[in-house]
Image: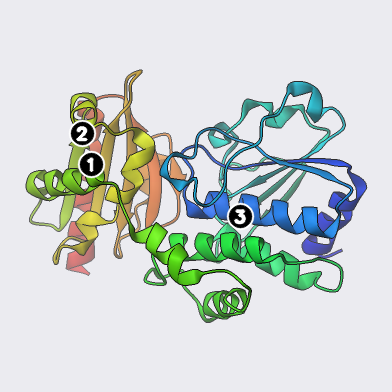
Amino acid sequence: MPIKQEIIDVIKEYQTIMIHRHQSPDPDALGSQGGLADIIRRTYPDKKVYTVGGEVGDLSYLNTMDNVTNEMYQGALVIVTDTANAPRISGEQYSLGEKLIKIDHHPDDEPYGDISWVEPSASSTSEMIYDLYEANSEELVMPSEAARLLYAGIVGDTGRFLYPATTAHTLEVASKLRRYDFDAAKLSRFMDEVDEKIARLTGYVYDNLIIDDSGAAMIILSNELMQEYDIEDSDTHALVPLPGRIHGIISWGIFVEQPLGGYRVRLRSKGPVINGIAKRHHGGGHPLASGAKAVDKEEIEVIFQELITVATEAAIF
């Protein structure tokens, strides 16, 4: 049986469905989670469907989370979208359900779930959710709000269709979603705007970015700096693309100190594969966009040297 049909058949079996996504969500996490929830709600109005996870930061214009209890998971179906490995799932209750489905577009290095649908070639999990709908369009209903969320997820994960994962199919899906009744221009403005404090921190990033001759770059955002600019880790996603706008930079890392110690690491590249670096440092992800963890500044230096290595090798070949 095709996986898309199997997933719909399982959804039809359950009265209560809890949909999770990854921690520190981006537009694709919220778009795929909320889009799938809206499709199920509209198609099967008798079902109880909840979106679950932690704070969404400045992305509340996309979706907000439901309040749930552990008891609500009894006999429930749990679906996790856009989350490569179980430790990154937002909402600890995900393991309390009766059955778990994973829907994701990251490399499947750490499988989990009773049913797993993973498509690393997809631009985003939001694109996959549209494909799930289209494969079952005779039964499923696509509300305009779901279309808005899925469109936002695709736009977010493709960098407004700039990244290599953008395919002809991606553009076709985006075109079909634009036919629904939502304000795409308003959505784009929301996605492009940043708070004043983030704009000011942008200046700091450009002023203090360390750039190696190889084309590798890095910056550390300390707890003291975060407090000075009154921002949290969830706010820093807007800073990740900044180094890539500078001519000559081909790989870079953003290192965000965590309140309880250690650093969250965001790695990006214009060509050299960097997910191998992430895997060596308690992370993973796409070849050109990955996340990892660093215990201290010594590990940060190790990661930066690895970025320099891949950037140097890319220049040689």
First in sequence: mark 2 or mark 1? 1
Tell me the amino acid under the disc marked 3: Ser
Name which residue lies at 17% across and 58% down: 312
Q: Are marks 2 and 3 in contact (CB under 8 Å)?
A: no
First in sequence: mark 2 or mark 3? 3
Residue 179 position (above or below residue 23): below
The one of 250 and 305 positioned closer to us in this rendering = 250
The residue identified by callout 3 is: 32
What secondary structure is found at the residue carrying circle 1? helix
Mark 2 vs mark 3, foreground winner is: 2
The residue identified by callout 2 is: 229
Q: Are marks 3 and 1 in contact (CB under 8 Å)?
A: no
Residue 234 in percent (x, y) is at 39, 38
The residue identified by callout 1 is: 197
The one of 89 and 306 positioned closer to us in this rendering = 89
Give the position of the N terminus as an image quadrant.
Answer: bottom right
Residue 119 in percent (x, y) is at 61, 61
Tell me the amino acid under the disc marked 1: Lys
| In-image side of 289 versus 102 (left or right) | left
What secondary structure is found at the residue carrying circle 2? loop
First in sequence: mark 3 or mark 1? 3
Q: Are marks 2 and 1 in contact (CB under 8 Å)?
A: yes
Asked if residue 218 can be seen in this view, the reply is no
Numbered badge on residue 48 = none
Q: Mark 2 to mark 3: distance in Å?
A: 31 Å
Residue 198 position (above or below residue 72): below
In the image, farthest residue toward the right: 13
Tell me the amino acid under the disc marked 2: Tyr
Q: Mark 3 to mark 1: distance in Å?
A: 28 Å
Q: Residues within 10 Å of mark 1 (few under 14, many from 20)?
A: few
Q: Residues within 10 Å of mark 3 (few under 14, many from 20)?
A: many
Residue 315 in percent (x, y) is at 18, 66
